[in-house]
Protein backbone atom coordinates (compact mmCIF):
# COMPACT_ATOMS: atom_id res chain seq x y z
CA UNK A 1 0.00 0.00 0.00
CA UNK A 2 1.55 3.29 -1.12
CA UNK A 3 0.80 6.89 -0.21
CA UNK A 4 1.78 9.39 -2.88
CA UNK A 5 3.24 12.85 -2.47
CA UNK A 6 0.61 15.57 -2.42
CA UNK A 7 0.20 17.62 -5.58
CA UNK A 8 0.12 21.39 -5.54
CA UNK A 9 -3.19 23.13 -6.19
CA UNK A 10 -3.74 25.18 -9.34
CA UNK A 11 -6.58 27.41 -10.42
CA UNK A 12 -6.72 25.90 -13.88
CA UNK A 13 -9.43 23.63 -15.28
CA UNK A 14 -9.18 20.80 -17.82
CA UNK A 15 -5.39 20.81 -17.89
CA UNK A 16 -2.99 17.98 -18.65
CA UNK A 17 -2.22 17.65 -14.97
CA UNK A 18 -4.47 16.81 -12.02
CA UNK A 19 -4.84 20.07 -10.05
CA UNK A 20 -6.10 18.38 -6.88
CA UNK A 21 -4.47 17.51 -3.55
CA UNK A 22 -5.06 13.87 -2.65
CA UNK A 23 -3.55 10.87 -0.92
CA UNK A 24 -3.03 7.76 -3.05
CA UNK A 25 -3.32 4.11 -2.03
CA UNK A 26 -2.73 0.97 -4.09
CA UNK A 27 -4.12 -2.05 -2.22
CA UNK A 28 -3.26 -5.50 -3.53
CA UNK A 29 -6.23 -7.37 -2.08
CA UNK A 30 -9.97 -6.82 -1.95
CA UNK A 31 -9.88 -6.84 1.84
CA UNK A 32 -7.30 -4.03 1.90
CA UNK A 33 -9.44 -1.95 -0.46
CA UNK A 34 -12.54 -2.50 1.67
CA UNK A 35 -10.64 -1.46 4.79
CA UNK A 36 -9.66 1.81 3.10
CA UNK A 37 -13.24 2.42 1.97
CA UNK A 38 -14.49 1.67 5.45
CA UNK A 39 -12.04 4.27 6.80
CA UNK A 40 -12.38 7.06 4.23
CA UNK A 41 -15.86 6.48 2.75
CA UNK A 42 -17.30 9.55 1.02
CA UNK A 43 -13.93 11.29 0.83
CA UNK A 44 -12.44 8.51 -1.34
CA UNK A 45 -12.75 7.59 -5.00
CA UNK A 46 -12.01 4.23 -6.56
CA UNK A 47 -9.58 4.22 -9.50
CA UNK A 48 -10.00 1.26 -11.84
CA UNK A 49 -9.28 1.99 -15.51
CA UNK A 50 -9.25 5.74 -14.87
CA UNK A 51 -10.83 6.66 -18.21
CA UNK A 52 -13.67 8.51 -16.47
CA UNK A 53 -12.30 9.49 -13.05
CA UNK A 54 -9.06 11.09 -14.24
CA UNK A 55 -10.90 13.21 -16.81
CA UNK A 56 -13.29 14.44 -14.14
CA UNK A 57 -10.41 15.26 -11.81
CA UNK A 58 -8.59 17.23 -14.51
CA UNK A 59 -11.77 19.24 -15.06
CA UNK A 60 -12.22 19.55 -11.28
CA UNK A 61 -15.66 18.02 -11.43
CA UNK A 62 -14.57 15.82 -8.53
CA UNK A 63 -11.84 16.56 -5.97
CA UNK A 64 -11.39 13.48 -3.77
CA UNK A 65 -9.12 13.60 -0.75
CA UNK A 66 -8.18 9.94 -1.23
CA UNK A 67 -7.64 7.84 -4.36
CA UNK A 68 -7.81 4.06 -3.96
CA UNK A 69 -6.26 2.41 -7.02
CA UNK A 70 -7.62 -1.13 -7.23
CA UNK A 71 -5.94 -2.09 -10.52
CA UNK A 72 -3.57 -4.44 -8.74
CA UNK A 73 -6.32 -6.57 -7.17
CA UNK A 74 -6.10 -9.69 -9.32
CA UNK A 75 -9.04 -11.37 -7.62
CA UNK A 76 -11.35 -8.82 -9.29
CA UNK A 77 -10.16 -9.56 -12.82
CA UNK A 78 -11.73 -12.68 -14.34
CA UNK A 79 -14.31 -14.19 -16.69
CA UNK A 80 -15.56 -17.52 -15.34
CA UNK A 81 -17.98 -20.02 -16.84
CA UNK A 82 -19.96 -21.67 -14.05
CA UNK A 83 -22.35 -23.79 -16.09
CA UNK A 84 -25.64 -21.95 -15.84
CA UNK A 85 -24.08 -18.51 -15.43
CA UNK A 86 -20.97 -16.47 -16.19
CA UNK A 87 -19.20 -14.33 -13.59
CA UNK A 88 -17.23 -11.26 -14.65
CA UNK A 89 -14.90 -9.49 -12.23
CA UNK A 90 -15.39 -5.75 -11.91
CA UNK A 91 -11.79 -5.10 -13.00
CA UNK A 92 -12.16 -7.07 -16.22
CA UNK A 93 -11.16 -4.81 -19.09
CA UNK A 94 -13.29 -4.30 -22.15
CA UNK A 95 -10.51 -5.70 -24.31
CA UNK A 96 -10.70 -8.96 -22.36
CA UNK A 97 -14.44 -9.12 -23.04
CA UNK A 98 -13.74 -8.45 -26.71
CA UNK A 99 -11.34 -11.40 -26.89
CA UNK A 100 -13.61 -13.78 -24.97
CA UNK A 101 -15.36 -16.47 -27.03
CA UNK A 102 -17.59 -17.06 -23.99
CA UNK A 103 -18.95 -13.50 -24.17
CA UNK A 104 -19.23 -13.57 -27.95
CA UNK A 105 -21.12 -16.87 -28.06
CA UNK A 106 -23.50 -16.51 -25.11
CA UNK A 107 -24.02 -12.75 -24.77
CA UNK A 108 -24.03 -11.19 -28.25
CA UNK A 109 -25.66 -7.97 -27.06
CA UNK A 110 -22.81 -7.37 -24.62
CA UNK A 111 -20.29 -8.26 -27.31
CA UNK A 112 -21.98 -5.72 -29.63
CA UNK A 113 -21.48 -3.08 -26.93
CA UNK A 114 -17.83 -4.04 -26.48
CA UNK A 115 -17.12 -3.56 -30.20
CA UNK A 116 -18.46 0.01 -30.23
CA UNK A 117 -17.06 1.14 -26.87
CA UNK A 118 -14.33 3.71 -27.62
CA UNK A 119 -11.15 2.67 -29.41
CA UNK A 120 -8.70 -0.12 -28.72
CA UNK A 121 -6.65 2.10 -26.39
CA UNK A 122 -9.71 2.83 -24.25
CA UNK A 123 -10.82 -0.83 -24.24
CA UNK A 124 -7.36 -1.82 -23.03
CA UNK A 125 -7.75 0.46 -19.99
CA UNK A 126 -11.46 0.76 -19.21
CA UNK A 127 -13.11 -1.80 -16.94
CA UNK A 128 -16.65 -3.08 -17.06
CA UNK A 129 -17.10 -2.23 -13.39
CA UNK A 130 -15.91 1.32 -13.91
CA UNK A 131 -18.32 1.80 -16.79
CA UNK A 132 -21.22 0.79 -14.58
CA UNK A 133 -20.14 2.67 -11.45
CA UNK A 134 -19.64 5.89 -13.41
CA UNK A 135 -23.43 5.67 -13.80
CA UNK A 136 -23.66 7.58 -17.05
CA UNK A 137 -27.08 7.33 -18.75
CA UNK A 138 -25.01 6.55 -21.87
CA UNK A 139 -23.02 3.67 -20.34
CA UNK A 140 -22.58 1.14 -23.16
CA UNK A 141 -22.55 -1.86 -20.83
CA UNK A 142 -25.82 -1.06 -19.05
CA UNK A 143 -28.54 -1.78 -21.68
CA UNK A 144 -27.13 -5.17 -22.75
CA UNK A 145 -26.59 -6.26 -19.15
CA UNK A 146 -30.15 -5.19 -18.35
CA UNK A 147 -31.69 -7.36 -21.07
CA UNK A 148 -29.41 -10.23 -20.04
CA UNK A 149 -30.84 -10.08 -16.48
CA UNK A 150 -27.43 -9.44 -14.95
CA UNK A 151 -26.91 -9.05 -11.22
CA UNK A 152 -24.23 -7.05 -9.43
CA UNK A 153 -22.35 -8.15 -6.32
CA UNK A 154 -21.47 -5.24 -4.01
CA UNK A 155 -18.90 -5.75 -1.26
CA UNK A 156 -18.00 -3.92 1.94
CA UNK A 157 -16.43 -4.78 5.29
CA UNK A 158 -19.95 -5.67 6.47
CA UNK A 159 -20.34 -8.34 3.80
CA UNK A 160 -21.76 -8.73 0.31
CA UNK A 161 -25.13 -8.12 -1.31
CA UNK A 162 -26.41 -8.99 -4.77
CA UNK A 163 -28.87 -6.77 -6.64
CA UNK A 164 -30.40 -6.81 -10.14
CA UNK A 165 -28.71 -4.29 -12.41
CA UNK A 166 -32.11 -2.67 -12.99
CA UNK A 167 -31.98 -1.49 -9.35
CA UNK A 168 -28.41 -0.17 -9.47
CA UNK A 169 -28.76 3.27 -11.04
CA UNK A 170 -30.35 6.22 -9.21
CA UNK A 171 -29.51 9.10 -11.55
CA UNK A 172 -26.64 10.59 -13.57
CA UNK A 173 -23.47 9.66 -11.69
CA UNK A 174 -25.46 8.10 -8.84
CA UNK A 175 -25.90 4.47 -7.80
CA UNK A 176 -27.26 2.57 -4.82
CA UNK A 177 -23.74 1.80 -3.59
CA UNK A 178 -22.93 2.98 -0.09
CA UNK A 179 -19.72 5.01 0.45
CA UNK A 180 -17.98 1.93 1.91
CA UNK A 181 -18.98 -0.42 -0.94
CA UNK A 182 -17.40 -1.33 -4.24
CA UNK A 183 -18.59 -3.42 -7.15
CA UNK A 184 -17.02 -6.85 -6.91
CA UNK A 185 -18.47 -8.76 -9.88
CA UNK A 186 -21.27 -9.12 -12.41
CA UNK A 187 -23.17 -12.39 -12.78
CA UNK A 188 -25.09 -13.16 -15.97
CA UNK A 189 -27.35 -16.18 -16.39
CA UNK A 190 -26.79 -18.01 -19.64
CA UNK A 191 -29.61 -17.27 -22.09
CA UNK A 192 -32.47 -19.64 -22.77
CA UNK A 193 -32.05 -22.04 -25.66
CA UNK A 194 -33.48 -20.48 -28.80
CA UNK A 195 -33.13 -16.89 -27.61
CA UNK A 196 -31.03 -14.06 -29.05
CA UNK A 197 -29.92 -10.57 -28.11
CA UNK A 198 -28.50 -7.45 -29.75
CA UNK A 199 -27.28 -3.93 -29.00
CA UNK A 200 -27.28 -0.88 -31.26
CA UNK A 201 -25.63 2.45 -30.54
CA UNK A 202 -26.01 5.71 -32.44
CA UNK A 203 -23.25 8.27 -31.85
CA UNK A 204 -21.72 11.32 -33.56
CA UNK A 205 -18.48 9.42 -34.16
CA UNK A 206 -17.45 5.82 -33.71
CA UNK A 207 -15.71 6.58 -30.39
CA UNK A 208 -18.18 9.05 -28.90
CA UNK A 209 -20.77 8.50 -26.19
CA UNK A 210 -24.16 7.37 -27.43
CA UNK A 211 -26.77 9.80 -28.64
CA UNK A 212 -29.17 6.92 -28.10
CA UNK A 213 -28.69 3.17 -27.66
CA UNK A 214 -30.87 0.10 -27.31
CA UNK A 215 -30.48 -3.53 -26.34
CA UNK A 216 -32.99 -6.32 -26.82
CA UNK A 217 -33.34 -9.99 -25.92
CA UNK A 218 -35.94 -12.17 -27.61
CA UNK A 219 -37.33 -15.69 -27.80
CA UNK A 220 -39.95 -16.87 -30.29
CA UNK A 221 -41.84 -20.17 -30.21
CA UNK A 222 -44.35 -21.26 -32.86
CA UNK A 223 -43.78 -17.86 -34.48
CA UNK A 224 -45.01 -16.03 -31.37
CA UNK A 225 -42.95 -13.89 -29.01
CA UNK A 226 -42.71 -15.66 -25.64
CA UNK A 227 -39.93 -13.56 -24.10
CA UNK A 228 -38.75 -10.05 -24.84
CA UNK A 229 -36.65 -7.53 -22.93
CA UNK A 230 -35.80 -4.01 -24.09
CA UNK A 231 -33.42 -1.48 -22.52
CA UNK A 232 -32.63 2.04 -23.68
CA UNK A 233 -29.58 4.19 -22.96
CA UNK A 234 -29.09 7.96 -23.26
CA UNK A 235 -32.81 8.59 -23.10
CA UNK A 236 -33.50 9.15 -19.39
CA UNK A 237 -31.58 10.03 -16.21
CA UNK A 238 -30.57 6.35 -16.08
CA UNK A 239 -30.54 3.46 -18.55
CA UNK A 240 -34.09 2.05 -18.48
CA UNK A 241 -36.11 -1.04 -19.29
CA UNK A 242 -39.41 -0.56 -21.15
CA UNK A 243 -41.89 -2.96 -19.47
CA UNK A 244 -45.04 -1.63 -21.20
CA UNK A 245 -43.54 -2.11 -24.65
CA UNK A 246 -42.34 -5.56 -23.66
CA UNK A 247 -45.81 -6.48 -22.40
CA UNK A 248 -47.38 -5.30 -25.65
CA UNK A 249 -45.06 -7.58 -27.65
CA UNK A 250 -45.54 -10.76 -25.61
CA UNK A 251 -47.83 -13.23 -27.40
CA UNK A 252 -47.68 -11.34 -30.68
CA UNK A 253 -46.72 -13.06 -33.94
CA UNK A 254 -43.18 -12.13 -34.89
CA UNK A 255 -43.86 -10.14 -38.03
CA UNK A 256 -41.94 -6.98 -39.03
CA UNK A 257 -45.17 -5.01 -39.40
CA UNK A 258 -46.30 -5.90 -35.88
CA UNK A 259 -42.86 -5.20 -34.41
CA UNK A 260 -42.78 -1.80 -36.12
CA UNK A 261 -46.17 -0.87 -34.71
CA UNK A 262 -45.57 -2.06 -31.13
CA UNK A 263 -42.12 -0.51 -30.67
CA UNK A 264 -43.66 2.94 -31.10
CA UNK A 265 -44.64 2.58 -27.45
CA UNK A 266 -41.03 2.99 -26.30
CA UNK A 267 -41.28 6.79 -26.65
CA UNK A 268 -43.76 6.80 -23.75
CA UNK A 269 -41.23 5.06 -21.47
CA UNK A 270 -38.25 7.34 -22.00
CA UNK A 271 -37.59 10.98 -21.11
CA UNK A 272 -34.72 12.23 -23.29
CA UNK A 273 -33.32 15.76 -23.14
CA UNK A 274 -31.67 18.22 -25.52
CA UNK A 275 -27.91 18.35 -25.00
CA UNK A 276 -24.66 18.86 -26.90
CA UNK A 277 -24.93 15.46 -28.57
CA UNK A 278 -28.54 15.44 -29.72
CA UNK A 279 -32.11 16.59 -29.22
CA UNK A 280 -34.94 14.96 -27.33
CA UNK A 281 -36.97 14.81 -30.55
CA UNK A 282 -34.21 12.98 -32.41
CA UNK A 283 -33.71 10.52 -29.57
CA UNK A 284 -37.42 9.67 -29.45
CA UNK A 285 -37.66 9.14 -33.19
CA UNK A 286 -34.49 7.06 -33.44
CA UNK A 287 -35.32 4.96 -30.35
CA UNK A 288 -38.20 3.33 -32.26
CA UNK A 289 -35.95 2.50 -35.20
CA UNK A 290 -33.05 1.00 -33.28
CA UNK A 291 -35.33 -1.05 -31.01
CA UNK A 292 -37.01 -2.49 -34.10
CA UNK A 293 -33.64 -3.23 -35.72
CA UNK A 294 -32.27 -4.79 -32.53
CA UNK A 295 -35.32 -7.05 -32.26
CA UNK A 296 -34.85 -8.21 -35.85
CA UNK A 297 -31.19 -8.98 -35.18
CA UNK A 298 -32.09 -10.77 -31.95
CA UNK A 299 -34.60 -12.92 -33.86
CA UNK A 300 -32.03 -13.76 -36.51
CA UNK A 301 -29.51 -14.76 -33.86
CA UNK A 302 -32.08 -16.81 -31.96
CA UNK A 303 -32.82 -18.76 -35.13
CA UNK A 304 -29.18 -19.91 -35.24
CA UNK A 305 -29.09 -21.28 -31.68
Image (cartoon, grey):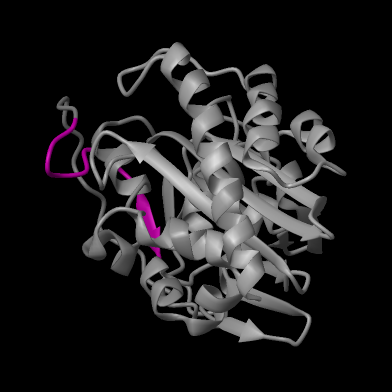
- Where is residue 75, by image quadrant? bottom right
Classify residue 304 by image quadrant: bottom right
Up-down relation of residue 270 to residue 34 (above or below): above
Q: Can residue 190 be seen at all in this image of the molecule?
A: yes
| Residue 162 screen position, x and y as percent | 80, 60
Picture coordinates of residue 238 (x, y %)? Answer: 60, 32
**Residue sitting at x 54%, y 26%:** 235
Magenta-colored segment: predominant secondary structure: loop
Residue 180 visible to an observer of this rendering: no
Tell me which residue sits at (73%, 47%) in the image.
Answer: 254
Tell which of 114 and 261 is nearer to you. Answer: 261
In the displayed structure, 94 sits above or below 12; it is: below
Magenta highlight range = 14-25
Q: Quadrant of the N terminus?
A: bottom left
76 relative position to 70: left or right: right
Residue 178 point in image, percent of width and height: 70, 45
Picture quadrant of residue 124: bottom left
- Is residue 23 on the magenta stretch? yes
Q: Does the magenta portion include 135?
A: no
Amino acid sequence: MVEAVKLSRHNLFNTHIIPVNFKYFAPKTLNEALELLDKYGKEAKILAGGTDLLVKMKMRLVEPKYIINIKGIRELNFIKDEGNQVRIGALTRWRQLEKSELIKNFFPSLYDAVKVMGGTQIRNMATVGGNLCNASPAADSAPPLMVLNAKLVLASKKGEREIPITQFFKGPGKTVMEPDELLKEITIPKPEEGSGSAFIKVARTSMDLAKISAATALKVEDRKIVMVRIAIGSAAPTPVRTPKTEEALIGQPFRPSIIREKVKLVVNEISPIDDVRSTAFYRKEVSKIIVEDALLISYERASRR
